Image (spheres, grey):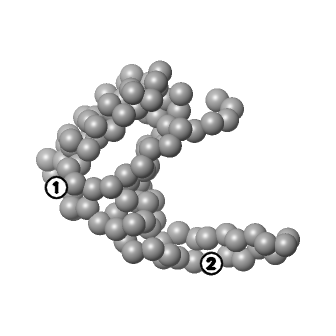
């Protein structure tokens, strides 16, 4: 099962200790073969709207900084419960904030 985990902006600025702990966590997940991809996202982004064959392209930002998705992790695990446990560990390192987790369907 694959899951996309995302975090939103507006949380506390990361300090050196958080960077070190997150680095260890990412390394552990990578070695275990669970972490497929991770990265930060530009909160401004670009929006594409398709209607009646016309495509409109609009540069962001579209939401308040605290509502914009600013990072992601794509993981592959055996169950939703395992994904939730990894998310718990992530938030124990990060502290306060908001994020989402969605199962990814499609070819593997």
Pick the residue in front: 72 or 31: 72
Q: Quadrant of residue 85?
A: top left
Extreme left residue here? Answer: 17
Viewer-proximal residue, 48 or 41?
48
| Residue 27 locus on image (x, y percent) | 32, 32
In the image, 62: left or right of 21?
right
Residue 81 is at least partly visible in this image: yes
The answer to whether residue 44 is above or below residue 84 is below
* Residue corresponding to mark 1: 15
Which of the two discs, 1 and 2, sits closer to the camera?
Answer: 2
Q: Residue at x 72, y 77 (%)?
A: 56
Q: Which residue is mark 2?
A: 58
Location of residue 59 with respect to 14 vertically, above or below: below
Answer left or right for 86 relative to 6: left
Q: Secondary structure at mark 2?
A: strand
Q: Which mark is residue 105?
A: none
Q: Residue at x 67, y 69 (%)?
A: 48
Residue shown at 79%/72% (left/top)? 51
């Amino acid at each position: 099962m694959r899951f996309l985990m995302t975090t939103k902006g507006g949380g506390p600025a990361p300090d050196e200790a958080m960077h070190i702990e997150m680095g260890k966590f990412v390394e552990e997940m990578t070695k275990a073969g669970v972490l497929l991809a991770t990265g930060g996202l530009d909160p401004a982004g670009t929006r594409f709207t398709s209607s009646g064959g016309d495509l409109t392209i609009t540069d962001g930002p579209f939401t308040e900084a605290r509502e914009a998705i600013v990072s992601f992790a794509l993981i592959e695990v055996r169950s939703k419960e395992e994904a939730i446990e990894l998310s718990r560990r992530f938030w124990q390192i990060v502290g306060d904030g908001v994020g989402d987790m969605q199962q990814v369907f499609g070819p593997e």
